[in-house]
Every structure is written in C-alpha cells, then in structure tokens.
Image (tube, grey):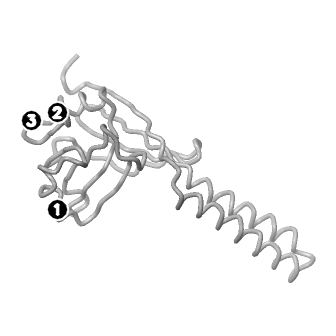
Amino acid sequence: MVRGDVFKEQIVKRQSTPLTTLKKVGLVIAALFIGMIGMAIGQAFGPFILAAVVFAAWFGMSFLNVEYEYTFTAGELDIDAIYNRSRRKRIFSARVNDFEIMAHVEDNRHTGAFHGAQVTKNYSSGVVGSNTYAFMLNHQNKRTKIIIEPNDIMLKALASVLTRRRLHIKL
C-alpha cells in the first residue's frame, strides 16, 4: 500500500451539555405554548397548527443529537456531522498538508500558534480529554482553528502526512 492510500474512519459523539438540555426543554415549552395558542385561535385549524408545531420541535431537537465522523483518505481529512443518526452533512474538508500546526488543546507550548484564529470550530465530543487536539489552517480565506478528538489510529494516519515540526503529540 502506498503511503497516500491510507483510509481511516472514526465517529465521535457530541456529549450532551446543560445548554443542550436547556434547548430541548425550551423547544418543548415553546411548542406547547404555540400549540395551545393555535388551538385557541383557530379552532378549525387548531389540530393542524398543533401537529406542525410538534413536528417543528421534533425536527429542531434532532439537530441537537450530533455525531462527527472523521474520514482520512489519501492525505485529506473530511468531517461530517450526523444529526440524530439519520442525516449527514459534510461540514469540513481539507488537505492535511495545509495544517500549519496540530497540538493538544492543553499544550501551553503552542498556544501562541493558535492565537489570532478568526474562526474556531469544535468537532469533538465537547469534553477535553487526552486525545483532544486542535489544528490551525487557512480555510475559506480565514485563519481557522479546528478542534477534533482523533483516536490513536487516526492520529497515526495524520502523523503519516504531517511532519514533526507541525504535529505535536501529547505524551
């Protein structure tokens, strides 16, 4: 197998936070409130309004259940968001050679390299762990910091492309 023919996949589930729970509760309360108003105002169309509001709340809540799939193929990293285990959307794609630096998010020796990011995107579980890394690159004409959680297999695949000068693995 040629070095560039590496193919690795990994799924990372976004952890539920108190803010996520608050959003879900808010959606349910808003749906009930709007549904009750709809039932009171339009008695003939009330059930249709209620059904539409319940569907909108369910649809909105499905976007709060997110998994990220990292796919590394031939030197390119693609990240897809999978909503409610049913809808997939490509949210990031770049050549790993374009990474300026990649280091653990708690590595104080490299915080200066991440200073000045115009955009920060977090495609990790949301909980900082021993495998939570960030990388910096110029993406869509903006200095962008991306946070991911590669497992050891994915990290080795990324290391096969990145030089030691640009990849700083936490020991």
- The residue lying at 86 percent from left, 83 percent from top is 41
For label 2, the residue is 161
- The residue lying at 39 percent from left, 51 percent from top is 91
Amino acid identity at mark 2: Val
Nearer the observer, 156 or 56 = 156
Q: Nearer the viewer, mark 3 or mark 2?
A: 3
For label 3, the residue is 164
Image coordinates of residue 104 in percent, x first then y, are: 23, 44
Image coordinates of residue 146 in percent, x first then y, are: 29, 52
Q: CA distance from mark 1 to mark 3?
A: 20 Å
Q: Residue furthest right?
A: 44
Callout 3: helix, strand or loop?
A: loop
Nearer the observer, 98 or 23 = 23
Image coordinates of residue 130 in percent, x first then y, are: 30, 38
Task: Tell me whether the residue at label 1 lies in contact with that at label 2, contact meaning CB atoms closer than 8 angstroms.
Answer: no
Q: Is residue 76 left or right of residue 17?
A: left
* Sequence-first disc among 1 and 2: 1
- The residue lying at 18 percent from left, 28 percent from top is 160
The label number, if any, that marks residue 155 in the structure image: none
Nearer the observer, 40 or 168 = 168
- The residue lying at 17 percent from left, 65 percent from top is 116
Image: 66 above or below 156: below
Amino acid identity at mark 1: His
Q: Is residue 100 left or right of residue 118?
A: left
Q: Is residue 50 left or right of residue 28?
A: right
What quarter of the picture does the N terminus occupy? Answer: top left
Image: 9 above or below 78: above
For label 1, the residue is 115
Q: Residue furthest left?
A: 165
